[in-house]
């Protein structure tokens, strides 16, 4: 993640406000509003923040997405699917030898991971739902 995007994400994570504008972020981070626009776009594309409607405001507001981290994982999932397709073509293209072993290990590991993670996310969400309503002092 680029430095400004990481700073913007940190601002969203630590903000007590429900939503932030580019101007809010710029003020919080001590940078120009223009410099945070790319960061906002990157963090939004990752699925961690989303646009938020604020009644009476003409400015564009953004907030942390509910379940941001599982959303981030699901977007990475599609990237891993693409990598797996390429690895599978590599497995089919090479003969016996070290490359075949490395490629089949990689394919088998990511296939296993992709099959197991949805159940982990589901168990995580079930565990979290049992703790809803808790708040720290």
Image (cartoon, rainbow, N blue to C red):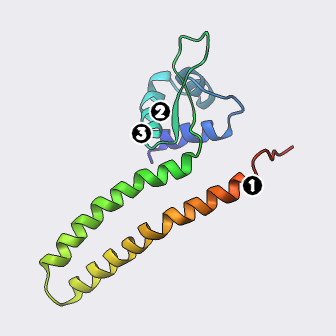
- Could you tell me which residue is drawn at 48 percent across and 50 percent down? 72
Q: Which mark is residue 45?
A: 3
Q: Residue 5, percent across and down?
A: 48, 40
Q: Is residue 17 above or below residue 49?
A: above
Neighbour tally class for label 2: few under 14, some 14-19, many 20 plus, Cα within 10 Å: many
Q: Is residue 135 left or right of residue 103?
A: right
- Could you tell me which residue is drawn at 81 percent across and 44 percent down? 135
Q: Residue 69, percent across and down?
A: 55, 50
Q: Is residue 123 left or right of residue 133?
A: left
Neighbour tally class for label 1: few under 14, some 14-19, many 20 plus, Cα within 10 Å: few
- Label 2 residue SS: helix
Mark 3 and 2 residues: CB-CB less than 8 Å, in contact? no
Quarter of the C terminus within the rendering? top right
Is 107 or 25 nearer to us in this picture?
Answer: 107
Foreground label between 1 and 3: 1
Quadrant assignment, res 128 = bottom right
- Label 1 residue SS: loop
Distance between mark 3 and mark 2 Cα atoms: 8 Å
Q: Which mark is residue 130?
A: 1
Residue at the spot of label 2:
40
Q: Earlier in the sequence, mark 3 or mark 2?
A: 2
């Amino acid at each position: 993640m680029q430095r400004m995007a990481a700073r913007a994400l940190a601002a969203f994570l630590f903000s007590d406000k429900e939503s932030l504008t580019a101007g809010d972020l710029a003020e919080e981070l001590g940078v120009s509003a223009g410099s945070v626009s790319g960061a906002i776009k990157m963090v939004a594309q990752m699925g961690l923040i989303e646009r938020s409607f604020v009644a009476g405001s003409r400015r564009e507001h953004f907030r942390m997405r509910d379940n941001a981290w599982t959303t981030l994982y699901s977007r990475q999932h599609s990237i891993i699917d693409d990598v797996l397709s390429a690895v599978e073509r590599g497995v089919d293209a090479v003969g016996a030898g070290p490359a075949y072993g490395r490629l089949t290990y990689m394919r088998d590991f990511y296939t296993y991971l992709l099959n197991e993670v949805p159940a982990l996310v589901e168990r995580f969400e079930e565990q979290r739902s049992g703790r809803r309503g808790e708040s720290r002092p």
